[in-house]
Image: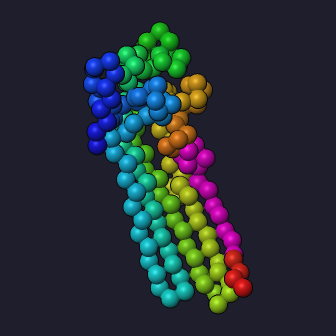
């Protein structure tokens, strides 16, 4: 994917970076996001799994003058002296797997359940995300990794 932003006659490639800081609320701009859902139906039973993958991206934002890791790490105050450790220069890719099932007991009753973030993947560290830099993860893209595994079970009745 590509995202070119032109500011004052200068063009900046922002796909794969944290930019644009001033437009996107500093949410980050991964090059790739993929969602795949697979569903299996057998009589009254339906099982589905969904994979949500976000590629890695850097802390830089060339459109805002954050051209290297040191500037990116200093932007929200985590490493104000510019000595950002190398492991924080990129936000790692993130894969979330969700699982859901439903079983139709009869004409009226259906049981259902789901597990979000099935493998309890932790959100990758993102020191330059929006929110004033107080959260070490990106709530707009990896909230399920901050919450952790989440179960939902229920039943529904149709009249």
Q: Residue furthest top?
A: 81
Q: Quadrant of residue 90?
A: top left
Residue 7 place in picture, x, y as percent: 34, 22
Residue 64 place in picture, x, y as percent: 40, 19
Q: Which residue is drawn at 50% across and 48% down?
A: 121
Q: In this view, does 35 lie above or below 88?
A: below
Q: In which quarter of the image is residue 65?
A: top left
Which image quarter holds the C terminus?
bottom right
Taking the magenta stretch, the answer to whether it contains residue 150 is yes
For the rendered model, the colour scheme is rainbow
Residue 39 place in picture, x, y as percent: 44, 73
Q: In this view, does 28 lie to the left or right of 77?
A: left
Question: For the image shown, how many numbered marks are present on the structure?
Answer: 0
Residue 134 place in picture, x, y as percent: 60, 26
Which image quarter holds the N terminus?
top left
Q: What stretch is highlighted in magenta?
A: 143-155
Taking the magenta stretch, the answer to whether it contains residue 9 is no
Of residues 128 and 79, which is closer to you in this image? 128
Visible in this render: residue 87? no
Of residues 94 and 21, which is closer to you in this image? 21
Visible in this render: residue 81? yes
Q: In this view, does 44 lie above or below 100?
A: below
Q: In this view, does 132 lie to the left or right of 73?
A: right
Q: In this view, does 95 lie to the left or right of 31?
A: right
Q: Which residue is drawn at 66% across and 68% down?
A: 153
């Amino acid at each position: 994917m590509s995202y070119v932003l032109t500011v004052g006659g200068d063009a900046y490639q922002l796909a794969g970076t944290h930019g644009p800081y001033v437009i996107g609320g500093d949410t980050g701009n991964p090059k790739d996001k993929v969602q795949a859902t697979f569903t299996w139906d057998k009589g009254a039973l339906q099982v589905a799994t969904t994979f949500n993958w976000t590629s890695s991206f850097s802390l830089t934002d060339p459109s805002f003058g954050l051209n290297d890791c040191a500037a990116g790490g200093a932007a929200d105050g985590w490493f104000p002296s510019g000595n950002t450790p190398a492991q924080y220069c990129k936000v790692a890719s993130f894969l979330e797997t969700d699982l859901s099932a439903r079983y139709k007991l009869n004409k009226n009753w259906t049981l259902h359940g789901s597990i979000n973030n099935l493998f309890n993947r932790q959100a990758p560290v993102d020191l330059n995300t929006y929110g004033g830099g107080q959260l070490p993860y990106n709530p707009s893209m990896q909230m399920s990794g901050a919450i952790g595994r989440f179960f939902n079970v229920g039943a529904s009745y149709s009249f």
